Image: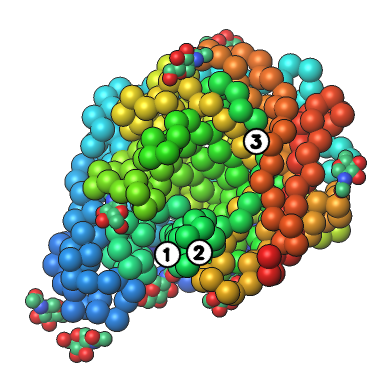
């Protein structure tokens, strides 16, 4: 009876909303998931699974099925010390036993550096009240038996990688790819133009940098793939490398269409056509050895406790990426102070550009349709930037980090170059000092459709 169901928390918006508006310490009055599989039974089941049982899933072939099976077993190879009380198939795993620590042999647990600040301004509360959303796992909630539903210090929440989940993808490569499956994969169209299924409304600055920061306004547009994020990019062609993060809605996240916190990395141009490799080239979240998480209460891949509404409250969170001494640190700030969530060790970039510094920062939205010919989904709130405050999506407090240092002060980003999609999505850049209290900011998004 210890196995309980944050599945309901993660899966049902109505329950989440009602619950989090109340007293954070109330027990959750939801039933146990009757078919919850304890971790101790889970791995043997994966070991003994065979393709026949999964022949009605999306997986393309028996060979791909076996690749998925091997990946799951590989990921949990080092895991022995874990918390048995889990929900939504999130396991609490000892920091040192998570796949990244185990497979990349990371050794001792690092002290995170301090965040980089923007000395002259604090807060992000004009022209209306923005509010800080938080990760449901960190609110100190308890289930109805009194068990905590967040992980204790020293353990990290990791979404369980099940064959049921992986076989929603045709191939293991699809699972690792940015965008995933139909909606995400860039394909050349018959005219030979690549990136046909992806559209952006984003702004760039080309500058040698060690990361950056923004406050990201949160929405959940109805879409198969739509996001708001940061990009830190280095290299070019097949050597293009990135550090990325933000929120994303995608038909493959099991969250009833609610946006999740995501991170992504690639060291080899996303394994796109012409840049194919058999080596690990990147993935989302904790789905492959890459990101080392240290923090026990931010659930990467999880939902938020609040989302913005048109003409209503504007919710969001602050994200900072910072390259400091060979680690790309991720900091998140919900209702409290920034917290160090973990890092990408620069070794995953194999001596490439991003292991030293990034040469471009970018902020904004990206969206994709399922297939050529179908309409593009909404981006941001679904409103164009000209709708402005409380209607259009934004990111503010956008600065970049100039040095490899602890503490430090950022530089306001001077966004110049932009990528937009007339008719579907637009972006409006306001650079500091014109941005006043918001520093450098962008409004972006749009309804999608045909463009
Ligand atoms: C595959 O699994 C099914 C269902 O558990 C079982 O009946 C079958 O014998 C298995 N096949 C092989 C080749 O192991
Ligand atoms: C899946 O395998 C079972 C058992 O071999 C078979 O009866 C069924 O027709 C297969 N389904 C598909 C979609 O191939
Ligand atoms: C981090 O910030 C705190 C508070 O501002 C400061 O006391 C401390 O010295 C900083 N740490 C380092 C290593 O710079
Ligand atoms: C990269 O893509 C190719 C072609 O789809 C695929 O064969 C290969 O397995 C992919 N690499 C990885 C690590 O998934
Ligand atoms: C996702 O794509 C499918 C197939 O094109 C479509 O039927 C569905 O409505 C889309 N979902 C959303 C939320 O846009
Ligand atoms: C994965 O596929 C199964 C059917 O095989 C489906 O029931 C489930 O909803 C899918 N999960 C996601 C997240 O798409
Ligand atoms: C950025 O990295 C390149 C190597 O790719 C190096 O030449 C350059 O000095 C680095 N810049 C800074 C500011 O460290
Ligand atoms: C762009 O943003 C600025 C500053 O908020 C605003 O004054 C201007 O009207 C906006 N332009 C459009 C086309 O929305």
- Label 2, label 1: how far apart the Cα atoms are: 21 Å
Read off the residue under disc 3: 204
- Which residue is found at the position 38% from the left and 40% from the top? 238
Pair 2/1: label in front:
2
Task: Indicate the quadrant containing the N terminus: top left, top right, bottom left or bottom right.
Answer: bottom left
Q: Position of residue 56 (x, y in %)?
A: 29, 81
- Is disc 3 in contact with disc 1, using a CB cutoff of under 8 Å? no
Q: Which mark, residue 191?
A: 2
Q: Judge by depth and name the residue closer to the eye, 69 or 374.
A: 374
State how far apart marks 2 and 3 are (Cα): 27 Å
Residue named by callout 1: 181
- Point out the tag, 2 or 1, that comes first from the N-terminus: 1
What count of labels does the image hold? Answer: 3
Q: Residue at x 19, y 46 (%)?
A: 77
Q: Is residue 263 above or below residue 401?
A: below
Residue shown at the point (54%, 71%) measured from the top left: 372
């Amino acid at each position: 009876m210890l196995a309980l169901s944050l599945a309901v928390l993660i899966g049902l918006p109505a329950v989440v909303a009602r619950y989090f508006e109340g007293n954070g310490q109330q027990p959750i009055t939801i039933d146990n998931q009757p078919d919850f599989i304890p971790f101790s039974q889970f791995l043997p089941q994966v070991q003994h699974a065979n393709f026949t049982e999964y022949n009605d899933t999306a997986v393309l072939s028996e060979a791909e099925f076996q690749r998925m099976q091997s990946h799951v077993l590989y990921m949990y190879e080092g895991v022995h010390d874990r918390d048995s009380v889990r929900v939504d198939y999130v396991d609490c795993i000892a920091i040192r036993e998570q796949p990244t620590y185990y497979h990349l042999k990371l050794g001792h647990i690092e002290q995170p550096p301090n965040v980089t600040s923007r000395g002259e301004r604090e807060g992000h509360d004009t022209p209306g009240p923005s509010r800080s959303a938080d990760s449901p796992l960190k609110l100190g909630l308890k289930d109805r038996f009194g068990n905590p539903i967040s992980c204790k210090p020293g353990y990290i929440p990791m979404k369980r990688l099940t064959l049921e989940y992986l076989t929603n993808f045709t191939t293991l490569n699809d699972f690792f790819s940015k965008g995933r499956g139909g909606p995400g994969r860039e394909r050349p169209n018959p005219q030979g133009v690549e990136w046909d299924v992806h559209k952006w409304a984003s702004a760039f600055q080309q500058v040698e940098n060690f990361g950056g920061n923004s406050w990201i306004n949160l929405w959940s547009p109805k879409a198969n793939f739509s996001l708001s994020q940061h990009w830190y990019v280095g290299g070019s062609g097949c050597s293009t490398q990135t550090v990325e993060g933000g929120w994303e809605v995608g038909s493959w996240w099991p969250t009833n269409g609610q946006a999740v916190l995501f991170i992504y990395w690639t060291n080899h141009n996303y394994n796109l056509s012409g840049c194919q490799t058999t080596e690990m080239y990147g993935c989302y979240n904790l789905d492959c050895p890459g990101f080392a998480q240290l923090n026990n209460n931010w659930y990467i891949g999880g939902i938020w406790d609040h989302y913005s509404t048109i003409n209503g409250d504007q919710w969001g969170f602050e994200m900072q990426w910072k390259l400091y001494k060979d680690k790309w640190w991720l900091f998140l700030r919900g209702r409290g102070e920034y917290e160090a969530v973990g890092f990408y060790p620069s070794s995953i970039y194999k001596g490439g550009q991003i292991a030293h510094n990034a040469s471009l920062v970018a902020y904004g939205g990206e969206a994709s349709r399922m297939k050529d010919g179908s309409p593009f989904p909404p981006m941001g709130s679904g409103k164009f930037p000209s709708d402005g405050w409380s209607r259009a999506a934004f990111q503010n407090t956008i600065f970049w980090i100039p040095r490899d240092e602890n503490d430090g002060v950022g530089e306001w980003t001077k966004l110049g170059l932009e990528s937009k999609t007339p008719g579907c999505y637009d972006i409006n850049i306001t650079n500091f000092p014109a941005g006043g209290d918001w520093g450098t900011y962008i409004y972006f998004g749009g309804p999608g459709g045909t463009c």
